[in-house]
Image (cartoon, grey):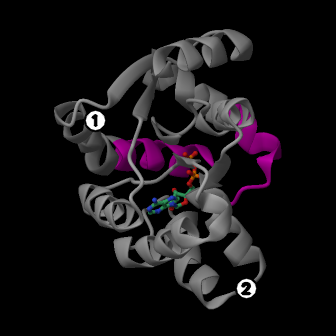
Amino acid sequence: MHLIFLGPPGVGKGTQAKKVCEHYKIIHLSTGEILRKEISDKSEVGNQAKTYIDNGNLVPDNVILRIIENRLKANDAQHGYLLDGFPRTINQAEGLQKTMLQLKHKINSVISLTANEEELILRLINRGKDSGRSDESPEIIRHRQKVYWRQTAPLLEYYNEKKVLKKVDGLGNITDITKRILETID
Ligand code: ADP
């Protein structure tokens, strides 16, 4: 099983991704989590990424693509995975397609989680109070939303044309949303 989760910041991708991964026994790959770990380890990649993340901008495609390529080739990724927060640009999606083709992996579904923007900003501002993340001030949150609509939302049409896109309403309680996602995939 190879899944991709798309959706604006705050829609609950991370929470739902964990549940869906438990269900299918696949690994959860969150590029945001990977990058935050690199930053706390003060690795070279982490140092390169930090300013972009703190300002709510995307880390350059070549940095992310290198990370993902290595990650997808690892042994533990040969039994399926869910990509959360990647791809985020058309260029990343094209890089992903190449890597997956080499590895003979095929995308089963791209789940687009949807919700209204004002609700998302409120959720993120609340989460920002105790997340400890450096990119969760109200100003940076609004900027991340803009970046999503400008750079990532075009992927909805890209995957729709490939007939793998499935939209799921991301509002409601956590268990109901997980059920909706699993029904959509099966
Ligand atoms: P959210 O979905 O709430 O925006 P993430 O944890 O997915 O949070 O991402 C946090 C930040 O990490 C992004 O704002 C961006 O700077 C960086 N990032 C994560 N994934 C990518 C990616 N695929 N390409 C570029 N930057 C990324």
Residue 156: mark: 1
What kind of element bears circle 1?
helix
- Which is closer to the viewer, label 1 or label 2? 1
68 relative to 142, above or below = below
Q: Residue at x 61, y 27 (%)?
A: 122
Q: Is residue 168 left or right of residue 46?
A: left
Location of mark 2 (residue): 42
Examine the rendering and report whether any part of residue 115 can be seen: no
What amino acid is at disc 2? Lys
Q: Main secondary structure of the magenta part?
A: helix
Classify residue 54 by image quadrant. Answer: bottom right
Magenta span covers which residues?
Answer: 125-148
**Is disc 1 in contact with disc 2, using a CB cutoff of under 8 Å?**
no
Would residue 130 be counted in the magenta stretch?
yes
Q: Position of residue 106 (x, y in %)?
A: 38, 47
Q: Position of residue 77 (x, y in %)?
A: 61, 60
Classify residue 125 by image quadrant. Answer: top right
36 relative to 82, above or below = below
For disc 1, the neighbor class at 10 Å (few under 14, some 14 to 19, many from 20) is some
Examine the rendering and report whether any part of residue 154 can be seen: yes
Which of the pair 157/96 is nearer the observer? 96
What amino acid is at disc 1? Leu
Q: Is residue 181 left or right of residue 160?
A: right
Q: Residue at x 66, y 9 (%)?
A: 176
What kind of element bears circle 2?
loop
149 relative to 133, above or below = above
What separation in Å lies between label 1 and label 2 (alpha carbons)?
34 Å
Q: Position of residue 155 (x, y in %)?
A: 27, 43
For disc 2, the neighbor class at 10 Å (few under 14, some 14 to 19, many from 20) is few
